[in-house]
């Protein structure tokens, strides 16, 4: 069975879930420390680099960090991510195989949806928390408002894709948005102070 409460706990910890692409495992722990120090403790490590699983392991050692895996494309990715210590799973799209694997692992699963059909398939599978992806190119806030009006208050979203520090507050003000995802907090920098400062600003976005 899908445990929605567990997923809500993941989504409600912080307003912004940093979407991380780690190229060098040596940077994983300092990056997580800087993010947590700034107030962002829910971290999505994308499986897009060879060291991603090791990065999940390293980041999981940071006190206070809740580390999950993103860009999980199939059950085998999910197996490897959970084995590495991922405590939640994010995927760019929704498949039945992933939904079933998340139940087997008893791991919170946030699948990507882009339209009403995706959400309907998710609901059929017992899911009601979705990553709206790619949020901006899919029509942005007007599109998500239209979708949310169809499905009502039992469905909640984490919009991701094209969201910035400037645009995040408008998304976060929507009652059906639990948090937003974004890569801006670590984009283009390995400097811990910069990451901590960006994380501090992001953590304050929703009161
Ligand atoms: C993702 O991986 O979920 C998105 O690519 C993140 O989007 P952004 O880089 O536009 O924040």
Image (cartoon, rainbow, N blue to C red):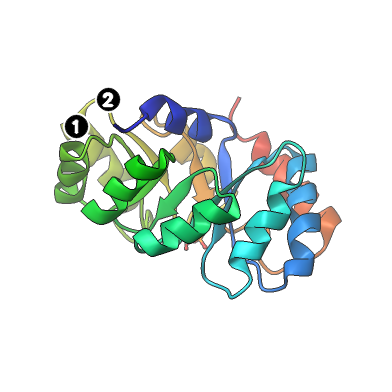
Residue in the image at 71% along x and 52% along y: 59
Relative to 86, is 54 on the left or the right? Answer: right
User: Quick check: marks 1 and 2 in contact, CB under 8 Å?
Assistant: yes
The residue under the point 58% across, 31% down is 13
Is 104 situated above or below 128? below
> Element type at marker 2?
loop
Q: Position of residue 114 (x, y in %)?
A: 26, 54
x and y percent of residue 207 in the render?
61, 24
- Is residue 150 shown above or below 110? above
Q: Is residue 119 visible?
A: yes
Q: Position of residue 176 (x, y in %)?
A: 36, 30
User: In the drawing, does residue 83 fall left or right of residue 197?
Assistant: left
Report the Cα–Cα distance between label 1 and label 2: 7 Å
Question: Which residue in the structure is indicated by mark 1?
Answer: 151
Q: Mark 2 — residue?
A: 154
| Residue at 76% over, 54% down | 195
Q: Secondary structure at mark 1?
A: helix
Residue drawn at point x = 37 percent, y = 29 percent: 3
**Nearest to the observer: residue 146 or residue 39:** 39
79 or 204: nearer the eye? 79
- Return the residue found at the far right: 193
Q: Is residue 85 left or right of residue 112?
A: right
- How dense is the environment of label 1, judged by Cα within 10 Å: few (below 14), some, or many (20 and up)? some
Q: Quadrant of the N terminus?
A: top left
Q: Is mark 2 within 8 Å of ligand 1?
A: no
Q: Could you say which disc has been placed on residue 130 in the image?
A: none
Question: Which of 103/121 is in front?
Answer: 103
């Amino acid at each position: 069975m899908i445990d929605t409460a567990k997923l809500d706990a993941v989504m409600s910890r912080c307003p912004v879930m940093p979407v991380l692409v780690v190229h060098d495992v040596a940077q994983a722990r300092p990056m997580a420390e800087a993010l947590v120090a700034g107030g962002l403790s829910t971290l999505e490590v994308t499986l897009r680099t060879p060291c991603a699983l090791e990065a999940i392991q390293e980041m999981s050692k940071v006190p206070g960090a809740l580390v999950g895996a993103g860009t999980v494309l199939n059950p085998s990715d999910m197996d490897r991510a959970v084995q590495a210590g991922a405590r939640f799973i994010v995927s760019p799209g929704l498949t039945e195989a992933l939904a079933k694997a998340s139940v087997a692992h008893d791991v919170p699963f946030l699948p990507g949806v882009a339209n009403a059909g995706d959400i309907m398939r998710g609901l059929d599978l017992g899911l009601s928390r979705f990553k709206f992806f790619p949020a901006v190119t899919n029509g942005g806030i007007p599109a998500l408002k239209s979708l949310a009006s169809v499905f009502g208050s039992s469905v909640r979203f984490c919009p991701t894709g094209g969201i910035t520090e400037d645009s995040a507050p408008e998304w976060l003000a929507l009652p059906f948005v639990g948090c937003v995802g974004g890569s801006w907090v670590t984009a283009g920098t390995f400097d811990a102070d910069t990451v901590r400062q960006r994380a501090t600003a992001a953590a304050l976005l929703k009161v």
